Image (spheres, coloured by chain):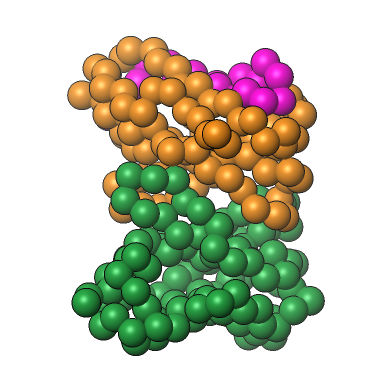
Chain colours: A orange, B green
Amino acid sequence: DTAVSQTPKYLVTQMGNDKSIKCEQNLGHDTMYWYKQDSKKFLKIMFSYNNKELIINETVPNRFSPKSPDKAHLNLHINSLELGDSAVYFCASSQVSGIGEQYFGPGTRLTVT
Amino acid sequence: GENVEQHPSTLSVQEGDSAVIKCTYSDSASNYFPWYKQELGKGPQLIIDIRSNVGEKKDQRIAVTLNKTAKHFSLHITETQPEDSAVYFCAATDSWGKLQFGAGTQVVVTP
């Protein structure tokens, strides 16, 4: 059973396009996250949702819009893609926000050409 | 905000030897310090964590130590095996409840 799943695993697209990444967790967790991992492996939090409500919004361009239709899903929509958006995007979930294990998905490798 | 520094960036060890990774943090309010292991092509996975009211924690070949006064914490892996080869990340929860990650350490265990 996959705890945190993401689709697609790979995404190659051109500059200016709009794309979405989907995430689902079957752990019954209340909190979900999006992280960006750049080419140097640096992991940085982008957003966090607790029970469908946005609780963390780092200084991310407003071209990135997360949506949580229910507490098991957190999708990420990106408008007007730029070269610098190329990275691996990880979804994660945890029982509570902040403290405690975060379970990461397998990642979505986004390449913008 | 929280700043987590991690050293070294790469670590090569012979199988059976020990590996030590060190991290420092800046926010004295941080109270949760997890360590994650990321294998190639996968998401990070928690291997051990420690809270600020504990100085040391051990789980089989892995141990973590925390010095709150000096604001540093370390990961110790004993009797390293080839399957320990991965990128290891330390992290600290800042006063907003966000996990701030270190830059990662690429560990290579050579047989």
Per the picture, the main secondary structure of the magenta-coloured stretch is strand
Q: Residue at x 72, y 70 (%)?
A: B51
The image position of residue B10, as x and y in percent, is 30, 71
Q: Is residue B15 magenta?
A: no
Q: Quadrant of the C terminus of chain B?
A: bottom left
Q: Residue at x 36, y 28 (%)?
A: A9
Farthest front residue? Answer: A1
Q: Nearer the viewer, residue A94 or B33?
A: A94
Q: Nearer the viewer, residue A113 or B40?
A: B40
Farthest top residue? Answer: A17
Instruction: Kindly indicate the quadrant of the structure image that contains residue B60.
Output: bottom right
Residue A85's place in the image compared with B36, above or below, is above
Q: Quadrant of the N terminus of chain B?
A: bottom right
Instruction: Kindly indicate the quadrant of the structure image that contains residue A72.
Output: top right
- Judged left or right of residue B91, residue B41 is left
- Judged left or right of residue A70, residue B85 is left
The image position of residue A16, as x and y in percent, is 31, 14
The image position of residue B16, as x and y in percent, is 33, 84
Q: Residue at x 67, y 36 (%)?
A: A27
Q: Is residue A66 magenta?
A: yes
Residue B75's place in the image compared with B93, above or below, is below
Q: Residue at x 73, y 43 (%)?
A: A95
Residue A81 in view (yes/no): yes
Residue A17's place in the image compared with A49, above or below, is above
Residue A63 in view (yes/no): no
Q: How many numbered marks does the figure carry?
A: 0
- Judged left or right of residue A54, residue B24 is left
The image position of residue A64, as x and y in percent, is 50, 24
Give, as a single range, the part of the protein colored magenta: A65-83
